[in-house]
């Protein structure tokens, strides 16, 4: 990073990477989504560098559950611990931005006791409302032909934890692992070998058992849902929801459900639905309102 500094430190057994280019009192925590690449996703690195270069102190934790494609409430607890640790240095000058699963986690973590009063804003990009609805969608859409990479990724991410059930050959397992380890770097493009394997995996009868396993886990994953989450009652921060109407991974209806839940809880919510982007991919060309959306976020970072 030009004229900047990148460091890593350990917090509660997890790794946090920080980016800075100046001594600033405003911190922004950035959460990655459900990806094996975690905070090494080149898009996330580029975003964090940009924030640091315009003067923010940026912190991005590697969330173990999301990196292993095994979502768990411990990731939210790790985020809460990071936010709490930052209050000593930054006081109430903290914002949090989360992408995809990280967007949902950011909303939940920002309402934690001892943290809520210090968070000035939360921006959730492509966040989901209900984990159950995402599971249902992934296994319902697996019959589409051809299976779009974004839809396939949602299914393959759920398959990862139970991949032994798929009974793949050694060669197929190697292709599967390489695909999941480098999916973001490939920018959602499948090789011919990937496409053949994805089609086979999607059609496997074992998918019914994988789906059943996930449904059984939902009870212990209840804290990962926005629906009825008690943390929302303690949320103080201004909330910004950013979603694409063309999102095939997390449909825009999820964003609408989040907005309704927050409004019903009396929270301050602003929503922008982009027209041209895909899941957590946006351009200023999407809509001129996107510029004003980010301008409102920036004003909050300057509030005394």
Image (cartoon, rainbow, N blue to C red):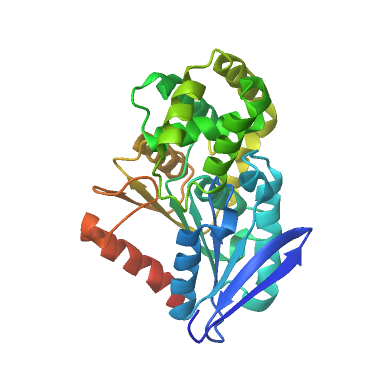
Give whichever of 70, 164 is nearer the camera.
164
Q: Is residue 108 above or below residue 87?
A: above
State how many labels appear: 0
Judged from this view, the residue extending furthest toward the right is: 13
Judged from this view, the residue extending furthest toward the top is: 205
Judged from this view, the residue extending furthest toward the front is: 171
- Identify the residue at horizontal 56%, vertical 35% (top origin): 176
| Position in image of residue 119 (x %, y %) | 56, 64
Q: Do we see residue 260 in this rendering?
A: yes
Could you tell whether 236 is left or right of 277 in the image? right
Q: Is residue 210 above or below residue 87?
A: above
Give whichever of 40, 283 is nearer the camera.
40
| Position in image of residue 20 (x %, y %) | 55, 79
Q: Do we see residue 250 in this rendering?
A: no
| Position in image of residue 104 (x %, y %) | 52, 46
- Identify the residue at horizontal 46%, vertical 47% (top origin): 266
């Amino acid at each position: 990073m030009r004229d900047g500094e990148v460091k890593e430190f350990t917090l509660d057994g997890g790794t946090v990477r920080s980016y800075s280019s100046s001594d600033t009192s405003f911190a922004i925590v950035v959460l990655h989504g459900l990806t094996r690449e975690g905070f090494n996703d080149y898009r996330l690195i580029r975003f964090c560098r940009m924030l640091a270069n315009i003067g923010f102190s940026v912190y991005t934790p590697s969330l173990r559950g999301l990196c292993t494609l095994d979502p768990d409430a411990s990731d939210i607890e790790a985020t809460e611990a990071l936010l709490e640790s930052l209050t000593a240095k930054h006081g109430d000058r903290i914002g949090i931005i989360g992408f995809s699963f990280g967007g949902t986690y950011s909303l939940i973590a920002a309402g934690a006791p001892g943290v809520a009063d210090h968070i000035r804003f939360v921006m959730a990009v492509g966040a989901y409302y209900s984990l159950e609805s995402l599971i249902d969608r992934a296994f319902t859409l697996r019959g589409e032909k051809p299976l779009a990479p974004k839809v396939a990724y949602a299914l393959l991410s759920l398959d990862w934890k139970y991949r032994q059930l798929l009974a793949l050959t050694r060669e197929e397992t190697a292709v599967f692992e390489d695909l999941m380890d480098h999916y973001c770097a490939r920018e959602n493009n499948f090789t011919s070998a990937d496409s053949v394997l994805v089609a086979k995996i999607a059609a496997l009868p074992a998918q019914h058992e994988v789906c059943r396993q996930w449904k059984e886990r939902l009870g212990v994953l209840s804290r990962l849902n926005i629906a009825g989450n008690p943390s929302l009652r303690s949320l103080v921060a201004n909330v910004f929801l950013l979603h694409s109407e063309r999102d095939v991974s997390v449909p825009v209806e999820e964003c609408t459900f989040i907005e309704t839940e927050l409004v019903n809880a009396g929270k301050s919510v602003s929503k922008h639905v982009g027209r041209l982007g895909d899941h957590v991919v946006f351009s200023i060309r999407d809509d001129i309102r996107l510029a004003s959306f980010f301008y409102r976020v920036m004003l909050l970072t300057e509030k005394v």
